[in-house]
Image: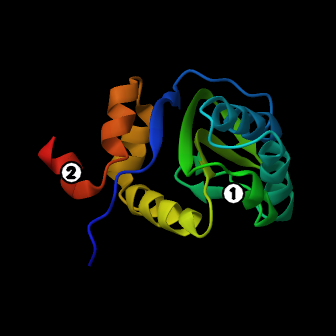
Amino acid sequence: MPEAAPLPLDPRAIRLDAAASSREDAITQCGRILLEVGAVEPPYIDSMLERERSISTYVGEGVAIPHGTAEGKDVVRHDAICVLRFPGGVDWDGERVDVCVGIAAKGDGHVRLLSELAQILLDPDRARRLREATEADAVLRLLQPAEEEADS
């Protein structure tokens, strides 16, 4: 099995004290951060909102993974993720979301990113630590492949 690569997370794309009035607001904030770090062009935000209208990006454990539609890939400059923690929670169509991990990926890059995020979220302890993280360094460590995290 190939060794997992670190997720493409710019430390500037971690916000641990965010607040959102709705899931649309939370998704828009994710899109704006991906835009700020140069990963996407402005239309990607609309693509993320369109994806949410077609299928919820809530994945369980208090986490949503908003990302764009297939058409949105055309405005992705490079693979990236952002992490927004909402201490007050966000109502996600009846579910409480505490963490949004926004994804932008060219080609099939989103499949790898979603797979690696799923591995983290399938570990209840790591998912809990992600929801409770208050420092960017802790988020960066949590989002490394499990083998690397064990070494640090």
Counting residues from the start of the chain, the first of labels 2 and 1 encountered is 1
Q: Mark 1 points at which residue?
A: 57
Residue 138 placement (x, y as % from top left)? 33, 32
Where residue 72 sits: x, y (%)? 78, 57
- Name the residue rendered at 52%, 52% in the picture: 61
Q: Nearer the viewer, residue 57 or 125?
A: 57
Is there a contact, CB below 8 Å, between mark 2 and mark 1? no
Instruction: Name the spot of residue 10 as percent of width and height, x first.
Output: 47, 35
- As helix, strand or loop, the secondary structure at mark 2 comes to helix
Q: Hey, what amino acid is under mark 1?
A: Thr
Q: Image point 37% across, 46% down: which residue? A: 143
**How is the model colour-coded?**
rainbow
Rendering quarter of residue 57: bottom right
As drawn, the residue found furthest toward the left would be 151
**Would you place residue 14 above or below residue 143 in this image?**
above
| Residue that badge 2 annotates | 148
Number of residues whose C-alpha sits closer than 10 Å to that of mark 2, classed few (under 14), some (14–19) or many (20 or more): some
In the rendered image, the quadrant that contains the C terminus is top left
- Residue 42 picture location, percent across and down: 80, 39
Cα distance between the residues tagged 2 and 1 = 27 Å
Residue 93 visible, this orientation: no
Question: In the image, which is nearer the foreground, mark 2 or mark 1?
Answer: 2
Q: How many labels does the image show?
A: 2
The residue positioned 34% from the left and 58% from the top of the image is: 5
115 w.r.t. 45: above or below:
below
* Residue type at the position of mark 2: Glu
Image quadrant where residue 19 sits: top right
Displayed quadrant of residue 68: bottom right
Q: Residue furthest bottom?
A: 1
The N terminus appears in which quarter of the rendering? bottom left
